[in-house]
Image (cartoon, grey):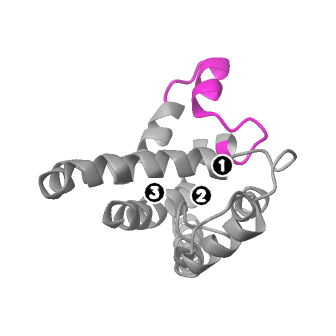
Amino acid sequence: ILLLLLGDLISTFCYHVPEHIFGKFHAVVHHSPNRSFVRYAILTKKPVALITGFFGAFPYLMFIPLFWIISPIGTILGLILAECHVEWRHVSLQHWQTPTRVKWICKIFCITTPERHWEHHLNSRVAFGDIFTFYDKPAQAWFRVLLRWKKMFRARYS
């Protein structure tokens, strides 16, 4: 659980939100109908797009040495849960409806559902937090701060 909490925190605030403001590939790839960094890299012959996919996963991977010492099984389980959640939240909503009980459990534990994640695909300023929904409001505030900084920087140096 600690791996998931810390990985999502760092991924959201150090990668995901800044990538929306300053990046290129996340918005082009992740918020388009073709949401595969690998497919995009192959089709456009831009393998650098894979780097942003790695940056999204790195906050989870960087804790492996620390958490492995504490609990190898817990570390492996955390990584498996994180990957399963990535796959689950990206199911097509045309063919998927999260069962009511599962939605209720996810709401109690602040877990992002596919429906909530699709809100983020439709409006990249809302529904942050890859795994946990409680990162959304602070991430939206961070988004506004970074956007203000970007505008100030452009105004000053343009």
Tell me if label 1 and label 3 are in contact, CB under 8 Å: no
Q: Residues within 10 Å of mark 3 (few under 14, many from 20)?
A: many
Tell me if label 3 and label 2 are in contact, CB under 8 Å: no
Q: Residues within 10 Å of mark 2 (few under 14, many from 20)?
A: some
Q: Determine the residue positioned at 49% across, 45% down.
A: 83
CA separation in Å, label 3 and label 2: 9 Å
CA separation in Å, label 2 and label 1: 6 Å
The disc placed on residue 20 is 2
Q: Is residue 153 above or below residue 96?
A: below
The disc placed on residue 27 is 1
Q: Is residue 109 above or below residue 48?
A: below
Q: Determine the residue positioned at 76% across, 62% down.
A: 99
Query: 151 or 2, which lies in front?
Result: 2
Tell me if label 2 and label 1 are in contact, CB under 8 Å: yes
Assess whether residue 45 is covered by the magenta stretch. Answer: yes
* Residue 62 visible to the viewer: no
Q: Which residue is mark 3?
A: 15
Q: Determine the residue positioned at 73% across, 55% down.
A: 121
Name the amino acid, label 3: Tyr
* Residue 112 visible to the viewer: yes
Element type where label 3 sits in the image: helix
Name the amino acid, label 1: Ala
The magenta segment: 30-48
